[in-house]
Image (cartoon, rainbow, N blue to C red):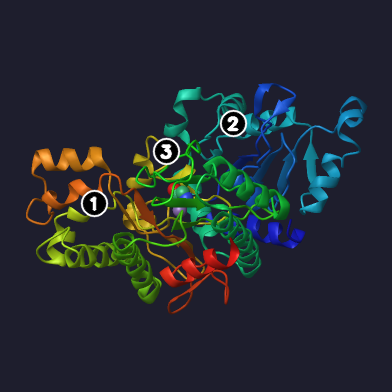
């Protein structure tokens, strides 16, 4: 948790940005049971609640009054019965005081507060809930049906919260640097443990252990797989086999829940084959081209920078043909990289995406205000600003089903050498990912002087020296 002044300032800043005449309702998360109520998944606070109220406890609701400088925290004090199981706990009054909130009341009073605002004709601003429990709670507070939150959530709130959360402060960047260190330990652990005969799950488990040693667990399910062509492959069932490439896309959270997200792809044997090295270096070049040019105002042009570098490389090795710019314009590189270059990173690994085009099934509200939405919640409109942290994660994947589909449709046949792709059906995929902070004039990679081994030489040397 940061100093209480941080949270007071953030709430005041939101009040300054939002239209007058209403309240903002920000519920924290509740416990999410795994198989019965007292056996819950590891608790993860809602990131926006954490941003404005800083508290890690379940079952709290924060309210920000937009017309008076007044914030509220609703929650129930623990009873002795709770304390028997959980030990002594601060009261809600004490929790509120720790983040500069004077007005506290029992949980049930949150509904009275919201209903009083509705009766007075005030606008109730809230974000669309993304968990079942949160959906039910928001319906209970507002009286709005569980299937109507997309229609009623607040575009003003979405736009302002995303803009504030995207611009990272110095203390947030320090947290992201701590998350980088966890990521460094995770990925170098994977490189040390991977070898012929070892189970993918052994590598994944050791990496995830690191996140608990140094922070608050993983920032998303780890991808640890020799089937890197499956973009979000969460199976760890494989056994490491010489000749294969292992793709590890994984990150951890700092104790204060800031995330890292890195990908490395390396040979199980510790040595790249010539063809693996060629494809790897094309991806690495795309990753580096992005680092060279990323600066405020960009995003789609960065995505295209990466695609162009990939096209040039693939033309160079005879898997594509024609002119790289034309291939990018025709969408041909999408066969090899069917995903975006990167995403915002912060307290969510895909920062603020619950509020945007990726998280909401119906985001027509923010599309209607596209001119105001220049944050990571709409990637097509994203304009990076100083303080933005994003991932740079190009890749080349050989996905047999996709190749077969495109080939059957003769899609982009002027640019793709389909006759050469048959021998790549067993290749897998390569992705390389680092995390960048956009500065006034350019960018810096998180990690400072330290980086996870990434060049062919660095990876091979690291694996030779540590296994
Ligand atoms: N690291 C997983 C993702 O970016 O989607
Ligand atoms: Mn990522």
Secondary structure under the numbered disc 3 in the rendered image: loop
Query: At 66% from the left edge and 32% from the top edge, which residue is drawn?
Result: 41
Residues tagged 3 and 1 counted as in contact (Cβ below 8 A)? no
Nearer the viewer's eye, disc 3 or disc 1? 1
To which residue does mark 1 refer? Answer: 334
Query: At 48% from the left edge and 51% from the top edge, which residue is drawn?
Result: 249
Residue 360 is tagged as 3
Q: Is residue 13 above or below residue 116?
A: below
Query: At 27% from the left edge and 48% from the top edge, which residue is drawn?
Result: 398
Splitting the image into 4 quarters, where does residue 385 fall?
A: bottom left
Residue 172 rendering spot, x and y as whole percentages:
63, 63
- The local crowd at label 3, few if under 14, some if 14 to 19, many if 20 or more residues have their Cα within 10 Å, is some
To which residue does mark 2 refer? Answer: 134
Residue 376 is tagged as none
- The local crowd at label 2, few if under 14, some if 14 to 19, many if 20 or more residues have their Cα within 10 Å, is some
Residue 26 rendering spot, x and y as whole percentages:
62, 41
Mark closer to the chain start, 1 or 2: 2
């Amino acid at each position: 948790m940061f100093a209480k002044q941080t949270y007071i300032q953030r709430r005041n800043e939101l009040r300054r940005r939002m239209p007058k005449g209403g309240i903002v309702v920000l519920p924290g998360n509740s416990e999410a049971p795994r198989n019965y109520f007292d056996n819950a998944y590891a608790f993860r606070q809602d990131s926006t609640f954490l941003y404005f109220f800083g508290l890690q406890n379940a079952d709290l609701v924060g309210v920000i009054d937009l017309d008076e400088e007044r914030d509220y925290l609703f929650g129930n004090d623990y009873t002795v019965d709770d304390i028997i199981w959980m030990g002594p706990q601060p009261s809600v009054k004490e929790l509120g005081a720790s983040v500069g909130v004077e007005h506290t009341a029992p949980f049930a009073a949150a509904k009275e507060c919201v209903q009083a605002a509705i009766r007075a004709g005030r606008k109730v601003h809230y974000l669309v809930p993304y968990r079942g429990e949160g959906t039910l709670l928001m319906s209970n507070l507002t009286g709005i049906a569980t299937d109507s939150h997309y229609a009623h959530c607040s575009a003003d709130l979405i736009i302002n919260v995303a803009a504030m959360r995207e611009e990272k402060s110095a203390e947030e960047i320090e947290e992201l640097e701590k998350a980088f260190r966890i990521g460094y330990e995770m990925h170098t652990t994977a490189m040390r443990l991977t070898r012929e005969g070892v189970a993918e799950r052994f590598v994944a488990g050791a990496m995830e252990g690191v996140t608990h040693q140094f922070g608050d667990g993983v920032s998303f399910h780890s991808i640890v797989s020799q089937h890197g062509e499956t973009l979000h492959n969460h199976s760890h069932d494989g056994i490491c086999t010489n000749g294969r490439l292992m793709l590890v896309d994984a990150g951890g959270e700092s104790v204060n829940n800031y995330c890292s997200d890195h990908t490395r792809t390396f040979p199980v044997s510790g040595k790249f084959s010539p063809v693996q090295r060629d494809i790897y270096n094309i991806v690495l070049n795309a990753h580096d081209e992005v680092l060279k040019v990323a600066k405020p105002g960009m995003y789609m042009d960065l995505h295209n920078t990466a695609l162009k570098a990939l096209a040039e490389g693939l033309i160079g090795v005879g898997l594509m043909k024609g002119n790289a710019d034309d291939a990018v314009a025709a969408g041909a590189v999408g066969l090899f990289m069917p995903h975006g270059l990167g995403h915002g990173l912060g307290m969510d690994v895909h920062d603020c995406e619950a509020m945007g085009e990726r998280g909401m099934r119906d985001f027509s509200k923010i599309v209607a205000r596209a001119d105001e939405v220049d944050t990571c919640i709409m990637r097509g409109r994203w304009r990076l600003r100083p303080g933005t942290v994003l991932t740079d994660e190009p890749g080349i994947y050989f996905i047999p089903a996709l190749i077969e589909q495109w080939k059957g449709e003769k899609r982009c046949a002027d640019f793709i050498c389909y006759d050469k792709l048959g021998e790549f059906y067993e290749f897998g995929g390569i992705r390389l990912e680092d995390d960048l902070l956009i500065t006034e004039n350019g960018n810096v990679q998180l990690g400072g002087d330290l980086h996870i081994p990434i060049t062919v030489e660095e990876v091979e040397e690291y694996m030779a020296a540590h296994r």
